Amino acid sequence: MRFRAGSRLAAGCLAALAALIAGGGASLLGTCGPFTDVAADAFCPLVLEVFYMGITTGTTPTTYDPTSNVSRLQMAAFLSRTVDGVVRRGSRRSALDQFWNAATQVTTVGTAPIGVKSDGLDVWVANNGSGTVSRVRASDGKLVDTWTGSLGGRAVVCAGGKVNVVAASTPNGTLYHIDPLQPPGAASVVATNLGDLSRAIAFDGSRLWTANNFSVSIVTPTAIPPWTVTTVTTGFGQMGGVVFDGSHIWATDGSAASLVQLGPSGAILQTVTVGALPQFPVFDGTNIWVPNFTGTSISIVRASTGAVLATLTGNGLSQPASGAFDGQRVLITSNNSSNVSLWKAADLTPLGFFDVGANSSRACSDGIDFWITQASAGTLVRF
Amino acid sequence: MRDQPRSTRALACLVVGTAMLAGAANGLLGICGPFTDVAADAFCPFVLEIFYLGITTGTTATTYDPGANVTRLQMAAFLSRTVDGVLKRGSRRAILDQFWTTQNATVLGITTLGNSPGLLKSDGADIWVADNVDGTVSRVRASDAKLLETWTGAPDAWGVLSAMGRIFISGVNSSGPGELYRIDPTQPAGAVTTLATNLGNGAAGIAFDGARIWTANSLGGGSVSIITPGATIPWTVTTVTTGFGETVGAVFDGSNIWVTSRTQNRLFKLDSSGVILQTVTVGTGPGYAVFDGTNIWVPNFSENSISVVRASSGLVLATLTGNGLTGPPLAAFDGQRVLVTSVVGNRVSLWKAADLTPITTVSTGADTSPWGACSDGIHFWIALDSGPPGQLARF
């Protein structure tokens, strides 16, 4: 071991000597930005990029120490700052010079708006009370169309250029379908035999999944309605939200305080214990954020393993209900507060909570703004 | 001068010693997330961020080994996971909660469109689709695939380019010089404006270098045309023939224009005058290539393969086969994935662009002949030349 350490030292000395020779020349010329110990060679632009992007600060204002090894601790700082810099500058908010956090616009939609989703251009809102679906143009918040006939509409998914709305009707949930190409009118009924009280909906690339009271329904679209529905009950309690992570469907079980990973037939593959009464989660590309309504917390679950990485509390949570992700930040709505809570998604640090004027229901992002429904106020808020 | 490295080494030893002490103390407390060997100091949030992001898993479930050096092999894993994580969560698909990959023809969003939809391009909001049989260009809103407008008067409409706030179309005239058309999207739909009628024969692929428009010309022996925008019509056209067989695809990599030659099985890198700077041998029958920010993906129609070429060096990094490739004419890129159409096999194939691993193959349905494709950052859009009538599919 001593020999090995010695040879490493010798190698280090050689490298240091080389650096001194190269660096010594460069330091006199000062050719690589502020760094006097980095040669003005092919590596210089790479060093300058990580300096200008704030990924490194150098070892001093004028040195970078180019030949030193990187410890795992230092590497964590470099990678973390890399992720932050790229995500922040790559966002649409950055390109539009919109770095603020504030509720900036209120659009009046129907009665008791709950479900909300962006199709990339317009925001679609399921109004549970009035049985209508509002189409709001994201750029200016204008109410463009109102579709009718979606009695009890509760949740929305935009998929394949179409809009699907699920209604928490009893004893069977109902699935409505809207073709945005058609003039606004009544939504089509494509299934009336979902499980009881469907509250949430997700798409996996070929089928729609709804979370119901004591069941999960899998809906296969067909050319002519009604669409094919398979309802699975085994192992399910009062289901809350449903989310697709690119590989699997996950659903929250409110009565069991769990998040379950499902196989293609709806069989439970994995059960993750979360907080009390988990509601409507969101996937951020790596982790699933599960708002625990009575637990007043957020469970962060690694989708690839099912491990609970952290349980977040505070930051204004009061009956947290629904999550949304905008590429950088996760927003959590609170049923019992006019505040919404924001976290930096990458490191789970709180970004504060913000008053949006009324208690909020659910939320989505279009990549620029978050859109928040407020059932009690009948409004859609741009945040 | 000799003192400096020695004192630096002494300082480094001190730092390591401090870290070990701090790590040992916090090991008992376990205050940096799950890690017992990381101090709850200024570095802790960085360690937690790469842990929460899945960039590191730690050396064990409870240790991170903060003082250890990183080998180049480990570094490759860390950087690869960093790139993947950033691209995935930064995509518009992630923001819209659309993590799915369309899995079959039944759930393709289909819009009936013209007789023979071919090449297409997004302007960021709408998709513009050329139809050489109808001589039309269709404007389709990406959010809901509504056909907004159909522009006429574009015989042989082939390649589509969105640039300068306008849409440019190459005309692939089979019996004479090619055409260049322009659409002003702010005007009511009507006839396109013809900018030039003296391009090389069979003007197909079209690209923009920031100042001039380039077309790859696929007939009459083959050539490349360079069109300079001007205040008056017709625009100035320079056509270069030296060294070119029948060229098909044209891409701009931020520095140079590249064209594929289907008769020479080559990818050519061009200088600003159209002189060939570099010749890359690719597969048989190269078609419409795409640049992913680092590499150029060249679909080889006649040998069911993709040549992946490093733009900075011209090196062929890999030749991809399988994954359903059957007569691939064209590749498209969405920031994460490359989609290649198989017009013969009636399917599309997807690769992860960062590491060239195949993702999946999806059928577009019998006799659908998918060939043109582009991305708007959320969806791929695929022209199905199944007609008449033809179709536009949202993938």
Image (cartoon, helix red, strand yellow):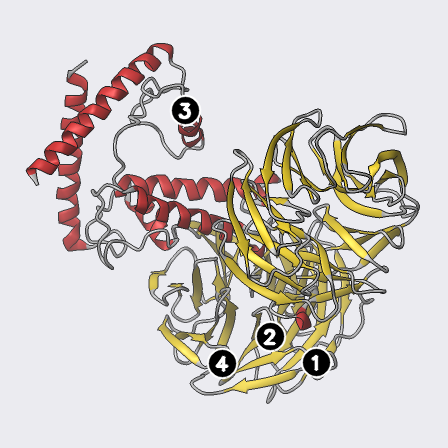
Name the mark on residue A44.
Answer: 3
Q: To which chain does the residue with label 2 belong?
A: A
**Marks 3/4 same chain:** yes
**Chain at tag 1:** A
Q: Is label 3 in a helix, a strand or a loop?
A: helix
Q: In the image, are marks 1 and 3 on the same chain?
A: yes
Q: Tell me where residue B146 appears, x and y as whole percent.
A: 79, 60
| Mark seen at residue A266 | 4
Q: In which quarter of the image is the N terminus of chain B?
A: top left
Q: B200 and A350: which one is in front?
A: B200
Query: Reading the chain from its start, which is encountered first: label 1 or label 2?
Result: 1
Residues under labels 1 and 3: Cα distance?
Answer: 61 Å
Residue B102 image position (x, y, % from top left): 61, 66
Identify the residue under disc 1.
Answer: A190
| Disc 1 and disc 3 in contact, CB within 8 angstroms | no
Q: Which element type, helix, strand or loop, lies under badge 2?
A: loop
Q: What residue type is labelled 3?
A: Cys
Q: Which residue is at a point 48% across and 58% down the rendered structure image?
A: A284
Specify which label sits upstream in the sequence, 2 or 4: 2
Residue position marked by numbered label 2 in the rendering: A207
Q: How far apart are marks 2 and 3 (CA)?
A: 51 Å
In primary-sequence order, the first of circles 4 and 1 is 1
Which residue is located at x 56 percent, y 37 percent? B311
- Amino acid type at circle 4 is Gly
Q: Residues within 10 Å of mark 4 (few under 14, many from 20)?
A: many
| Visible residue check, residue B352 | no
Q: Are marks 2 and 3 on the same chain?
A: yes
Q: Do the residues labelled 1 and 2 touch (CB within 8 Å)?
A: no
